[in-house]
Image (cartoon, rainbow, N blue to C red):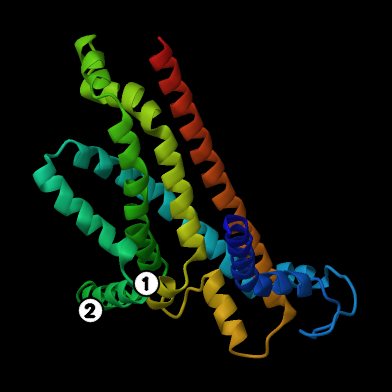
């Protein structure tokens, strides 16, 4: 009975993954199709990728997406790391509610965050005389990236021995020197993971970008959406394939890094126990 249930569970899981990823697999395959047909395979070609990189509107959207994602990830990493360190120094009475507030943007529906930020920018713009554009888009991305960085850095701070900072200061380091030379190296894996997650979230975002970019700025996801509203071109398959591969590579890097860190932590724990 156990063997039958195990086989049935594996088959059920395989069907779920097939249902989830079969459309993406079809999209990737037809991005190399010679014809514009989405149902009939006529031959292999890279022509749609060549047309994709020669399309100025798509390339401009790509440059905007990369610029916003990189800047937002860097700023969110710095702000999120400093915030995580500050939260770790607070008492549980204050830290718990603040962490709950930090989790709201992560759990909240993106459309709620997007509409809220849009209304805020429109309200402030009426007083400060600015319009939705690259600046508001960048601020929105930084805003929803910061919680992910905090959630990545906090566990590493909790794993760190608090006596290390005190020992460094006892040996003559200032607080900033101890922070730079002791704490930062200890929590660096969490910082790097947070930065990669922030970059991945930014490059993959559509809803929040749609509400905060205005009419003069367009990200890659917004460009794809506008292309699908007209006649669907095979270039959309090519863009989607590149986006899927990029996000997949980043997620693999994150998971590999986390698994290596866990393995190192277990190995260190095992050595300490044996001693």
Query: Which numbered dot is residue 126?
Result: 2
Image coords of residue 12 (percent x, y): 60, 67
Image coords of residue 26 (percent x, y): 73, 74
* Label 2 vs 1, first from the N-terminus: 1
The reply to whether residue 55 is in sight is no
Q: Nearer the viewer, residue 140 or 81?
A: 81
For image coordinates 34% across by 74% down, the residue present is 114
Q: Is residue 261 left or right of residue 99?
A: right
Q: Nearer the viewer, residue 177 or 23?
A: 23
Closer to the camera: disc 2 or disc 1? Answer: 1
Residue under label 1 = 110
Image coords of residue 32 (percent x, y): 81, 71
Where disc 1 sits, the SS reads helix
Q: Nearer the viewer, residue 27 or 133?
A: 27
For image coordinates 39% across by 72% down, the residue present is 208
Image coords of residue 74 (percent x, y): 42, 47
């Amino acid at each position: 009975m156990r063997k039958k249930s195990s086989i049935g569970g594996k088959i059920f899981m395989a069907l779920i993954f097939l249902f989830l990823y079969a459309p993406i697999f079809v999209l990737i395959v037809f991005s190399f199709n010679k014809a514009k047909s989405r149902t009939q395979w006529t031959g292999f070609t890279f022509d749609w990728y060549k047309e994709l990189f020669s399309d100025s509107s798509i390339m401009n959207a790509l440059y905007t997406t990369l610029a916003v994602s990189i800047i937002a990830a860097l700023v969110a990493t710095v702000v999120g790391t400093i915030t995580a360190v500050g939260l770790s120094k607070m008492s549980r009475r204050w830290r718990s509610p603040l962490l709950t507030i930090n989790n709201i943007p992560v759990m909240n529906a993106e459309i709620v965050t997007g509409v809220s930020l849009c209304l805020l920018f429109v309200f402030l713009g009426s007083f400060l005389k600015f319009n939705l554009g690259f600046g508001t888009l960048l601020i929105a991305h930084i805003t929803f990236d910061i919680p992910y960085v905090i959630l990545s850095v906090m566990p590493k701070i909790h794993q760190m021995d608090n006596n290390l900072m005190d020992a460094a200061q006892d040996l003559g380091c200032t607080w900033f020197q101890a922070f730079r030379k002791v704490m930062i190296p200890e929590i660096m894996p969490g910082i790097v993971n947070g930065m990669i997650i922030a970059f991945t979230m930014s490059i993959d975002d559509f809803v929040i970008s749609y509400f905060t970019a205005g009419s003069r700025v367009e990200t890659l996801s917004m460009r794809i959406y506008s292309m699908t509203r007209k006649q669907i071109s095979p270039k959309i398959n090519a863009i989607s394939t590149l986006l899927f591969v990029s996000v997949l590579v980043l997620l693999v890097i994150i998971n590999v890094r986390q698994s290596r860190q866990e393995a190192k932590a277990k190995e260190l724990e095992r050595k300490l126990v044996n001693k």
